[in-house]
Amino acid sequence: MARIAIGGFQHETNTFAPSPATFDDFARAGAWPGLTRGGAMFEVTAGFNIPIAGFIETARADGHELLPLSWAQATPSAPVTEDAFNRIAGQIVADLKDLRHVDAVYLDLHGAMVCAHTEDGEGELLRLVRAVVGPDVPIVVSLDLHANVTPQMIALSDRLIAFRTYPHVDMAETGARSAVQVASLLRDGAARAKAFRQIPFLIPVQTGCTMIEPAKSLYARLPEIERGPVASVSIAAGFAPADIHYCGPSVMAYAADTATAERTANDLAHEIEAKESAFVGKVWPMQEAVAHAIARGAKAGRPIILADSQDNPGAGANSDTVGLLGELIRQDARDAVLGLLYDPEAALAAHAAGEGAEITYPLGAKSGLPGHEPLRATYHVERIGDGAVTGTGPFYIGARMQLGPMALLRVNGVAVVVASRKNQAADQSMFRHLGVEPAAQKILALKSSVHFRADFQPIAEEILVVAAPGPNPLDYRELPYRNLRPGLRLTPMGPAFPNRD
């Protein structure tokens, strides 16, 4: 039986987003648990589809003693404040020091954390952890598929193990795979050779979905590669809205010897690069998408889904733009529902008025983004709810969400689900909480990029990726990058980032 210290610190950072991640954002529960220290971690994470829950279940079954540090997560946003990083990382390091002796460390990280004081949040955390445990104690890290992996992260860990699905339905499974890797390292210490390769183009978020090609085939190959001398291999697709030097996709390979690790990483990187043109995808202009959805939805028996990807809170947006909502109203869409719109004040106003009332209110656009204005109208308060939602779909399964006061507001034939906490619309339970049956709608406009597909694609007639106004452009050429490494192509088959030094 081994003594394994476990903890987590997750944030996906969009450096162009409007709002930073403060300590309070990590302390507050949302779709996932809030900041938790010590033994309470076991209870608050149990049953969630998150890596640390999968790790705990597998490692306990193997008889290991698990020593909890801290676990924290905040909704994607602008960089993490230095105060938040120092306080949470400080807890993890202080409690690790108090343990005096551990046989291994497991960390549930995202891989795309940028802080106000460092581009490489995970690399800095690993530096602090490695300084405590020394060079010989195995450190295994689970990562989000969208990690921006850095050389420091590679050097300071023994395994980086990324999700293999997008939507991320295998998060707990990835934690379980991490537990297997810890056990292997503790048992024989072998296969510690490593190789790291970066891919020379950014992968659009919508075409990186593993339910469609080319990502589907690439990720399906990984278990086949992990045979014989190859212990672990991962593809991290990168998180493009991060203006840092090491932004972008990468490959990580671990094997019994350096030559095998290098060959495995090279072969997989070349395979990804050969499929570059297949990562180019269609994006619909907003007016055209709404017109198509209305025409098609009138005849289809299943919903037409409009993915409001550019305002996806899962990518750091504030989920409060109303361009697509306004267009649905302008074109007189019927049986259309948009969600989740983040506007705590509107939700409270609806609760104060009560079900059946009407409120005239400037809805949305509270972030102060240039060019965005609230949508003032008279809304019928159809339903209100407390926002306590349990996830039922493959992505959020078991998640005990705390979305705050919620309301279903309707204007003409268009309804909007308003929430008091930012969360992407990736589970049908969020709509059913307010009496909306997603499958019965003609049009569903979802503030999500890809995660919604896990629960909504099976009920959809068609899915359109829409370029509605928002702070997270689907075309990365629109972002004012300054710090990318020279030569990185901003889109598949597109222009390379210039050397501005």
Image (cartoon, rainbow, N blue to C red):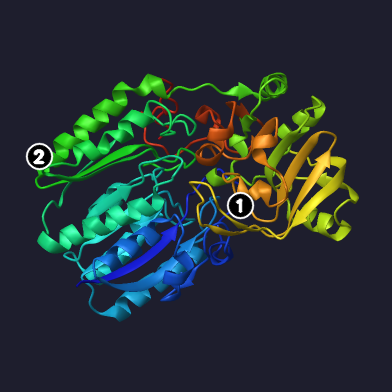
Residue 439 percent coordinates (x, y):
64, 36
The residues tagged by marks 1 and 2 sit, at their Cα atoms, a distance apart of 44 Å
Earlier-in-chain disc, 1 versus 2: 1
Question: Of discs 1 and 2, which sits in the foreground?
Answer: 2
User: Which quadrant would residue 339 be assigned to in this image?
Assistant: top right
- Which quadrant of the structure image shows residue 460? top right
Amino acid type indicated by mark 2: Ala
Q: Where is residue 232 in the image (x, y as percent from the top left)?
A: 22, 46
Q: Between 399 and 162, which is closer to the camera in this rendering?
A: 399
Kindly identify the amino acid type of the residue bearing the numbered disc 1: Ser
Q: How crowded is mark 1: few (under 14 residues within 10 Å), some or many (20 or more)?
A: some
The vertical placement of 323 against 102, above or below, is above
Identify the residue at image location x=57%, y=44%: 426
Q: Residue at the location (56% across, 23% down)?
A: 283
Q: Which one is in front, 302 or 209?
A: 302
> Dot 2 lies on which element?
helix
Q: Do the residues labelled 1 and 2 touch (CB within 8 Å)?
A: no
In the picture, the disc for residue 19 is: 1
Q: Which residue is drawn at 63% across and 30% down?
A: 306
Give the side of residue 96 with respect to residue 373, left or right: left
Q: Quick check: 294 left or right of 309?
A: right
Marks counted in the figure total 2
Please tell me how crowded label 2 is: few (under 14), some (14-19), or many (20+) other residues with Cα within 10 Å: few
Q: Mark 2 points at which residue?
A: 259
Q: Decide if residue 348 is on the left or right side of residue 472.
A: right
Local SS, label 1: loop
Whether residue 383 is situated above or below residue 105 in the rendered picture? above
| Place of residue 270 in the rendered image (x, y in percent of width and height, measured from the top left) | 25, 27
Label disc, if present, on residue 428 of the rendered structure = none
Q: Would you place residue 264 above or below residue 400 in this image?
A: above
